[in-house]
Image: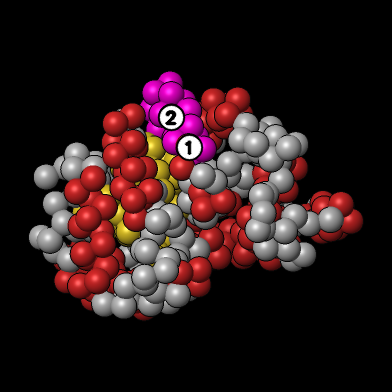
Amino acid sequence: MVNFTFRGLMAPTLTAFKEDLSINLDAIQDYAKFLTDSKIMGVLVNGTSGEGMSMNVAERKKVTEEWVKAVKKTNQHLMVQIGGAPLPDVLELAKHAESVGVHSLLCLPDLYNKPTTSTDLTRYLKTVGAAAPNTPLLYYHIPSYTNVNIHMGQFLNDVVGKIPTFHGIKFTSTALDEGSAAVKANGGKYAVFLGADQLMAGAYTLGFDSAIATTLNMFPQLGITILDAVKQSKLDKAKETQDILTQVCSTVTKNGSWVPTMKVAMDLYTPVKVGKAREPLVNITTDHVKQMKEEMKGIKL
C-alpha cells in the first residue's frame, strides 16, 4: 500500500496565463519559491483555483511537469488534480502524473455520469486509482460545483479497504457536521483537507488538521496564524484572524467570481503575476480592481 503522510497547509495554485491566455510556465519556479518562503510546503495543481478544467490534456501535463521540476528544488509536496475530464483523459492524466513523479493525486467525480452512491463513487475512483497504482489518491468533494452530494462521513467508512491507493478527501463544503464525520471516519485514519477559507477556525476546533485554501497563495500568513492559534488553544486569536480572512474573502470576491478575483489579488499582493482567467470565467473590470484595492486598504492585514 502506498503511503501518504502530508498534513497541514497546501496552496491550490493559480495557473499563470500570458496576455494571450496561453500558459505561462516561466512563472512556476518563482511561484514555488514564493510559497516556500511563505512556509507553505504543499501545492495542489490543476484544481478549481488552477483552472484545470479550462485547459486541455496537453496543457495540464505541461503545468504538472513544470511543477515537478519546481518542487524538486523546494521540497514541497505536489498534489495534482486529474479529474473534470472524460474518463479516458482522466486515466491518461493519472498515468502521466505518476510517470513524472507527483506525490499524490486528487480527483473530481465524473461530472456527467454523476455518482449517486458510495458504491458508484468507489467504482469510479478504483478505476482511476488503478491507472496510477503507486501514487496516493484523494477524492475532491466540492458539491457546489459538481452537484454530487454523497455524504463524506458515510463514503469514507464505506470505502475502507476497497481502493489500495486511497487516502482521503478535499472537503470543499460549509457542512461542518459532515466534515467532522469525515474526519472521524475509519478511526480518523484518512486525510481530510478543508477547502473553505472562511471556515478554517471553526473546522480546526472540530478536529480538522489540514486545509487546501486559495488564500494561502496570496495571504498565507492569515491561514498559518489561524492553524497555529488553534493548536496552541489561543481561540480568541484564531477567531480574530479568521474574521480578518473572512473580510478579505468578501472584499476580494465582491464584484466577481472566486477564481478571477483571487487572480487579481495574487497579482496585487504578491510578486507572482498570474494574469487573467480563461473562458468560461469572467474577469472583473478595471473599476472593480480599483474598488478592491481601495477597500482592502481598510482591512488590518
Q: Earlier in the sequence, mark 1 or mark 2?
A: 1
- Mark 1: few, some, or many residues within 10 Å (few <14, many ≥20)? few
Q: Quadrant of residue 300?
A: bottom right
In the rendered image, the residue lying farthest to the top is 73
**118 horizontally vs 66: left or right:** left
* Element at label 2: helix
Pick the front one: 9 or 93: 93
Residue on which disc 1 sits: 58
Q: Is residue 73 magenta?
A: yes
Residue on which disc 2 sits: 65
Q: What type is the residue that disc 2 sits on?
A: Glu
Q: Quadrant of residue 6?
A: top left
Q: Main secondary structure of the magenta part?
A: helix
Camera-nearest label, 1 or 2: 1
Measuring 56% from the left and 51% from the top, which residue is drawn there?
54
For the N terminus, the image quarter is top left
Q: How many labels sit on residues?
A: 2
- Mark 2: few, some, or many residues within 10 Å (few <14, many ≥20)? some
Pick the front one: 227 or 263: 263
What is the x, y in percent for residue 250? 69, 65
What is the x, y in percent for residue 23? 61, 35
What is the x, y in percent for residue 254? 74, 66
Q: Is residue 282 magenta?
A: no
Q: What type is the residue that disc 1 sits on?
A: Ala
What is the x, y in percent for residue 143? 44, 72
Q: Magenta residues?
A: 59-76
Q: CA distance from mark 1 to mark 2?
A: 11 Å
Measuring 62% from the left and 64% from the top, which residue is drawn there?
246
> In the drawing, what numbered circle is on residue 130?
none
* Element at label 1: helix
Mark yes or no: residue 107 visible: no
